[in-house]
Amino acid sequence: MAINLLVADDHNIVVDGLKLLLDKKTDNMKIVAVANTGSEVFELIEKNKNIDIFIIDIEMPEMSGLDIAKKIIKNNPDSKIIIFSTHSTKKAIEQALDIGVKGYLTKEDSSKNLISAINEVYEGNTFFSQKIANYVFNSYFNAKKTKNELSARESEVLKLIAEGFSKQEIADKLAISINTVNIHRKNIMGKLDIHNAVELTKYAIKEGFITLR
């Protein structure tokens, strides 16, 4: 069964190259639609109900590829999207991951990687180029490291701050002085580079120190 692809890229030379690559290297992948702008993507979606995977460049006219991806997934959360772009900045990668794309490759990647990405994403998996994968891996473990850098007592204090307890209440619960609470609070903020209680609470929720009920 053919894997039907929609390619969103405003550079015809890239699209033509993809067509030649897939025709030459595969017998199960077919570009069924090509969009040069954001609006064309959604017009083509209406006309083609059998698109399996979207391959989208980030830099597009009218709206960015990331905005296109976000709207596609909002309309259909099961959509499978691969970002294929020259852009691989920290901001672009994080936005793509937040949106929920299934793959991310740079245009420097090999044709073998692109074909592998299409196959993996079609099967319900994810695929990231080595550069993107390294960033994701390092970002994850840096976040873990930051969490682990807090001492047990600092973690307790952070949890209680996030749960809305006052300094006096925290001091009473932990049987320590208010001055000690202030010292722990200052150390926590320094380690996390966070400087107010609201942001501390957001961090505590995000990192699992507390659970919203």
Image (spheres, grey):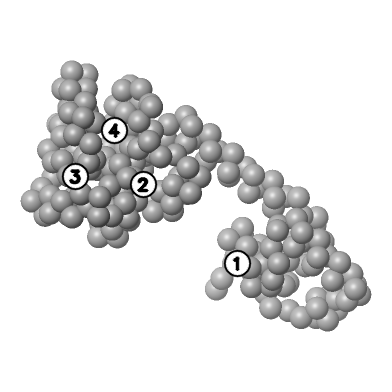
- Are the residues flagged by discs 2 and 3 in contact, CB closer than 8 Å? no
Mark 4 or mark 3, which has the lower sequence index? 3
Residue where numbered disc 4 is placed? 118
Rendering coords of residue 191 (x, y %): 75, 55
Image quadrant in which the N terminus is located: top left
Mark 2 or mark 1, which has the lower sequence index? 2
Query: Of residues 20 and 167, which is closer to you in this image?
Result: 20
Task: Tell me the amino acid under the disc marked 4.
Answer: Ile
Residue 56, numbered circle:
none
Residue where numbered disc 2 is placed? 101
Residue located 51% across and 45% down the image: 90
- Looking at the image, residue 86 sits to the left or right of residue 27; the answer is right
Q: Quadrant of residue 137?
A: top right
Rendering coords of residue 170 (x, y %): 80, 76
Instruction: Using the image, determine if residue 135 lies above or below residue 16.
Output: below
- Rounded to the nearest whole Å, what is the CA distance between mark 4 and mark 1? 36 Å
Mark 2 or mark 3, which has the lower sequence index? 3
Task: Tell me the amino acid under the disc marked 1.
Answer: Lys
Q: Secondary structure at mark 1?
A: helix
Residue where numbered disc 1 is placed? 202
- Looking at the image, residue 120 sits to the left or right of residue 143; the answer is left
Whether residue 210 is visible to the viewer of this picture, yes or no, is no
